[in-house]
Image (cartoon, rainbow, N blue to C red):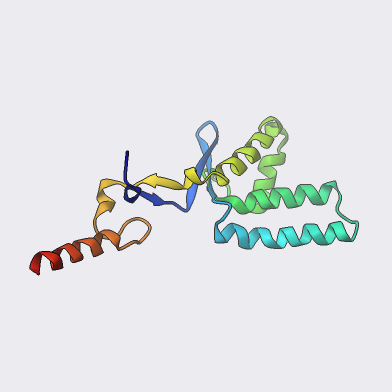
Amino acid sequence: MASFKDYQATKTATVEIFHGEHLTVRQLSSAEFLAAALPLHRERIELEQAGKFDEAAETRINLSTAFALVDSWSFDDDLTLDNFIELLQCDDLKGVAAQVVQNIDRTASDPDNFVKKKSPSSSTGLSESGSLTAAQEKKTSKRAAKA
């Protein structure tokens, strides 16, 4: 068994999509995702209340919500909402679009995907997350040794 101190949180996780191409996604609870998803949720409610929520609006809101989870991608194309939607609606990739969105959602909603084991080099000083924990422990042990 390992200590909880051997692990650290990460901000993104990788989703392999096809032929070595990948997306990095944010966690569902990330501030970036929540800030982007809240207006989409409000829009959905407003359209439903006005009786204007149709299939086109649902598709646009769902794809925009999935896009809000994507932090980056490996394609040469700029990561924009339009390019993301084009990827998912491209005739040549119709067979994989639904799985790509499912993989984004599955990865973003699993907390295990956002925790990794610390590397040995991050066990002293600043860790990748900016924590001073290990450095503080060293100072404390030096003080204890002097006493």
Please tell me whether residue 93 is drawn above or below residue 122 in the rendered image. Answer: above
Residue 78 shows in the view = no
Please tell me which residue lies in front, 132 or 78.
132
Residue 99 shows in the view = yes
Q: What x and y, as percent, mark residue 29?
A: 57, 55
User: Disc count in the image?
Assistant: 0
Q: What x and y, as percent, mark residue 61?
A: 74, 52
Q: Residue at x 19, y 61 (%)?
A: 138
User: What residue occupies the far right of the structure in this picture?
Assistant: 51
Please tell me whether residue 69 is drawn above or below residue 131 in the rendered image. Answer: above
Q: Residue at x 25, y 50 (%)?
A: 121
Q: Residue at x 30, y 46 (%)?
A: 119
Please tell me which residue lies in front, 10 or 110.
110
Please tell me which residue lies in front, 39 or 63.
39
**49 lies left or right of 96:** right
Q: Quadrant of the C terminus?
A: bottom left
Q: Quadrant of the N terminus?
A: top left
Q: Which quarter of the figure has residue 41?
A: bottom right
Q: What x and y, as percent, mark residue 102?
A: 64, 38
User: What residue occupies the far front of the structure in this picture?
Assistant: 147
Please tell me whether residue 89 is drawn above or below residue 10 in the rendered image. Answer: above
Q: What x and y, as percent, mark residue 99?
A: 65, 34
**126 lies left or right of 51:** left
**14 lies left or right of 95:** left
Q: Residue at x 50, y 42 (%)?
A: 14
Please tell me whether residue 34 is drawn above or below residue 20 in the rendered image. Answer: below
**7 lies left or right of 19:** left
